[in-house]
Amino acid sequence: MKALTAEIEQLIDTNASDFEISKRFKQAISAYIDSLPETFEQTQGKDFLVRHTKALDGFITLMYKTVLRRMFGNYLPMRSAIPVAFTALGSYGREQLCVHSDIDLMIVYVPVEGYNIEAIIEKFLYLAWDAGLKLGHRVHKADELFKAALEDITIRTAMMEARFIVGSNFTWHATQRELGRIRRHEPAAYLKAKIEEAAQRRAKHPVSMQPQIKEGVGGLRDAQLLYWIAKTLYGVDTLKTLAGDVFSEEAYRAYRIALELIYRVRSALHLVAGKQYDQLNLEYLPRVRQLLGFKSDMKLAAQVIEAMWRIDNFSRIYVTEMTRPLFAKPECVAPLRRRRIAPYFYVTEERVVSSRHLPPLSITKLLEILTALDDRPLTFDETVIRHFTAAEIRHPLTKKIKKLLRQIFERRHAGDILRLFYDAGVLAELIPAMRKTLFLPQFDGYHHYPVGLHSLQCVRALENIGDPTVRKLYEGLDTADRTLLKIVVLMHDAGKGRKLDHSEVGAKLIRSMLAKMGFGEEAKEDAALLVRYHTLMSNVAQRHNIHNEKTIYKFMSVVKTPRMLTLLYILTYADMTGVGPDVYNAFSAKLLYELYTAALEVSQEKERITDAARRLKIEQRIHRLEAFKALPRTQQKKITTIESNLFFFRHTPEEIIEIAQKAREVKTYSYELDFSTGLSIEILRKIPLNLSYLLGRLGYLDVASMEVFTLFDGVKYFKLDFLQTPTPDMYESIREIVEDSFDLERRVEIEIPKIKETEITLDCEHSKSYAELAVHTANQRGLLAFIVSGLDALDMQIATAKIHSTKHRARDHFLIEKTPRMCDNAALLIQLLCKGNA
């Protein structure tokens, strides 16, 4: 800065142009920004932010001096005589300015005759902009600050963080008087608005494995809210002033350590991205990790998630602690006392609150209070969270604590209490088996939450089952099975984060936990089996042909009994629902139910049931229906002579009759579109269907399942389900595509995907009537349309198809009607499908 000052002085002395001076500033600022990665290697966290802030103070101060020198020459007045004060706002004012954040500046002045203040300010701003500073600015007369602050809550908040940079000390003192007046003006209304603003922000940016470290839950904004409240109520310039008074030194130290990591991560993110970017996503995570010196991406992500939990815990507790006296209404005290459930504990509507004056309680006493609560949905106030956070928990846990934990799991509504344990930071202390996974991210393209939150979401899903079929099964369980299942749901992923298979590790962990809670050997065996195979049902339902009896018998050889099948079905529902929105959807629900009913039927048969016997049972159910009896005998015969067993396995008796009645009325073709849950296309046709064209034109949608069945009288039935729900403006174009698909001359350009020969399996001995084609490859646009076009080219007729795809992988299964030459063309089909690798 000294060298730059000398160069600028020389340029002024030689009467250099404004352009030459701004150019030199721009070069110096650019060189400084380029040096920041090297500076970051030497000092990180808050120290780096302070150094960066001070460096920018230096540039702004020198720019102001330069403007004065250019305007006054050698007759420069005393700086305090010029009634203007340059002040930093926001993160710049807090000395927390990040690399690519806006430099928020407020220029306050007092209009005094003899000084052309407006011209000074204008020249300064032009110089700063020309020099490349990313400047956000406000200009106010000192006596207008109060009015400006009341116009906008954001302006008022920014002014509370004002820090003097350069200018007149007298003007700064006048500014401070106005800022104090602003701070004292209607604090309750201001803080209430800030807390409501924070609630909206937190809802928009919930906890994530790719966290928004500025705006998200537990991010920098939550820490800033705590500071704004402390500043408003106590007039402090730093939270540290309140340590030992409002909060303990130990709690504040842990909070500061967490905040320091977030400062480091944010600075590294800005440096890596080369712009203002505050989401720690997978694109930038590896380079941020390298810059911060972490050994693995997972370790950094886990520590960031834990740090943000710590900031969230601390800020929530002490935002409530500091503001509760401000918002308390004396008239509410008496009604609250009538709802007392224990000394200093009260229930109001659905919320449990506690007195601020409650002395520290043991964890045993706190758990006893929880078990005494009515068994209904509850939320817990931050005053309650604070007591659990402060409670001392020693290991090994006492028998009394283990007994109380079991009582909590026996409640129909245990999920809210488990969430209280998580929010208070005691979940891993009370259930040590979850310690390694509590903040563990899951970067698998499937899960939306870290392991701990995912497990809690699964418990919530279990206690609030939305699927009527699953809910009926759950409600039919006895208390012992509901309790066991709830523990399994919470613990099913506790084995993650180890080198060994997490299901095997989890099975050992849950056995140990149940033993400590007093469960018997049979319960431990059942729980271990459920944890060991908690992904089995979803994998079989979505990746295998569940209408193949071999698949069902192999599945049931693991599950063993109808009771365990029901428990696994409910566990699978909870696990999938807890992953994130729309993972458990109409398509996955249908697959799981089909697997459950097929497996239940098998489990209840003493002897092995064949496909023929299974179909016969379904036909008997059809014959008993009044709708079937009302059909002409010729139509009844046509239904029972439909060749495909799969058609009967895939549909209910009622659906079979409905489809048959539609087929009876078909002249050339008919179709129905359903947009209620995704897109569903049902087609009945006598004339050929250009299926590859249809799939190619709809290639922008993900296919969930596809059925192709020959019925009777030359009618073929197609059912295609897509995951996405088209918008209403797309409905007409989809209808046109379906209509055009009956023109065999139409062609659509299909991208040729890359499929390896090792990713294709063709089993010509699958059954007497069908061969099975399996393609497990990378998920690629147009993949299904390409496979169908290949089958069409070889005149291979699809009987049915099972489509399963994730973000990265596709697992497609097709049953192909056997013809005399079909298997002779197997090599040709594989060659055709692999031509993308040629």
Image (cartoon, rainbow, N blue to C red):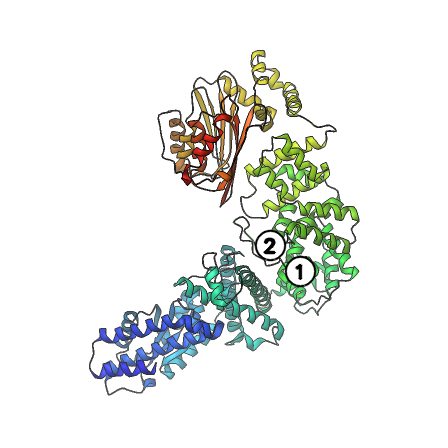
Q: Amino acid at mark 1?
A: Ala
Q: Which residue corresponds to the image point at 40% horizontal and 74% vertical from the top-left?
A: 88
**Residue 700 x, y percent position in the rendering:** 42, 39
Q: Nearer the viewer, residue 203 or 287?
A: 287
How much space separates mark 1 and mark 2, taking CA atoms? 12 Å
Q: Amino acid at mark 2?
A: Val
Q: In the rendered image of this protein, does residue 676 appear above or below residue 235?
A: above
Tag of residue 71: none
Q: Give the residue pinned by disc 2.
A: 451
Residue 619: quadrant of the picture: top right
Query: What is the quadrant of the C terminus in the image?
Result: top left
Q: Which residue corresponds to the image point at 57% horizontal and 38% vertical from the top-left?
A: 542
The answer to whether any part of residue 785 appears in the image is no
Q: Give the residue pinned by disc 1.
A: 428
Q: Secondary structure at mark 2?
A: helix
Q: Secondary structure at mark 1?
A: helix
Q: Which residue corresponds to the image point at 22% horizontal and 73% vertical from the top-left?
A: 19
Q: Residues within 10 Å of mark 1 (few under 14, many from 20)?
A: some
**Residue 769 x, y percent position in the rendering:** 56, 23
Query: What is the quadrant of the N terminus in the image?
Result: bottom left
